Amino acid sequence: MLLVIRTRGNVRVRPQIEDALKKLRLGRNHSAIVVKNTQSMRGMINRVKDYVTWGEIDSDIAEILVSKRGRLSGNRRLSDEYVKEHSEYTSMKEFSESLAAGEAKLSDVEGLKPLFRLSPPSGGYRGKISDPIKKGGVLGYRGPDINNLAKRMI
């Protein structure tokens, strides 16, 4: 599974890119989604590569992300009891492990919002927001290093 985090804002975004970001449910800065690593998703992410950073999520970060930033309708927090009642999983830990492995989707828990609202990273992005990773910036594919950034944003 891939964790995709939007790092740039809405000003002067081309309509095609804005449409792709809306389809990915990344309407605001510092929002994140978890998607399957399929060819169609990689194509969509590649289209918006100048506005997001992404990489493979591990189970520890998935657990922290779901437990601390997972929200239900009405902005209620996600709990183990809710996961047990409204899905086939017995706890948030079990759900997040299967989510990171690619066996589960966020829609498996009824009422769970499909995105996570994060805060800006503590210590900053450590690079220019408008440059790709290979130039010392923030944007683009990070691989497993996305987990370090996500941990600082949770």
Image (cartoon, rainbow, N blue to C red):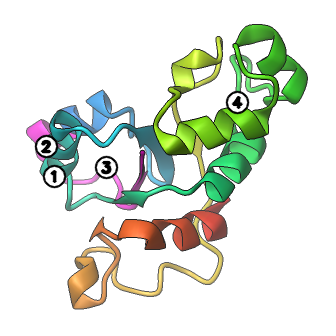
Which amino acid, by three-letter code, is at mark 1? Answer: Asn
Compare marks 1 and 3 and give the one earlier in the sequence: 3
Q: Earlier in the sequence, mark 3 or mark 2?
A: 3
Q: Which residue is mark 2?
A: 43
Task: Name the residue carrying label 3.
Answer: 10
Q: Quadrant of residue 140?
A: bottom left
Question: Marks 1 and 3: which is nearer the front?
Answer: 1
Q: Amino acid at mark 2?
A: Gly
Disc 4 secondary structure class = loop
Marks 1 and 2 close (CB-CB < 8 Å): yes
Instruction: Tell me which segment is drawn in magenta.
Output: 1-18
Q: For the C terminus, which image quadrant?
A: bottom right
Q: Which residue is mark 4?
A: 71
In the picture provided, is 70 more to the left or to the right than 40? Answer: right
Q: CA distance from mark 3 to mark 2?
A: 21 Å
Q: CA distance from mark 1 to mark 3?
A: 18 Å
The structure residue drawn at horizontal position 26% and vertical position 74%, both measured from the top left corner, is 130
Along the viewing direction, whichever of 113 and 63 lies nearer the viewer: 63
How far is mark 1 from mark 2, CA to CA?
5 Å
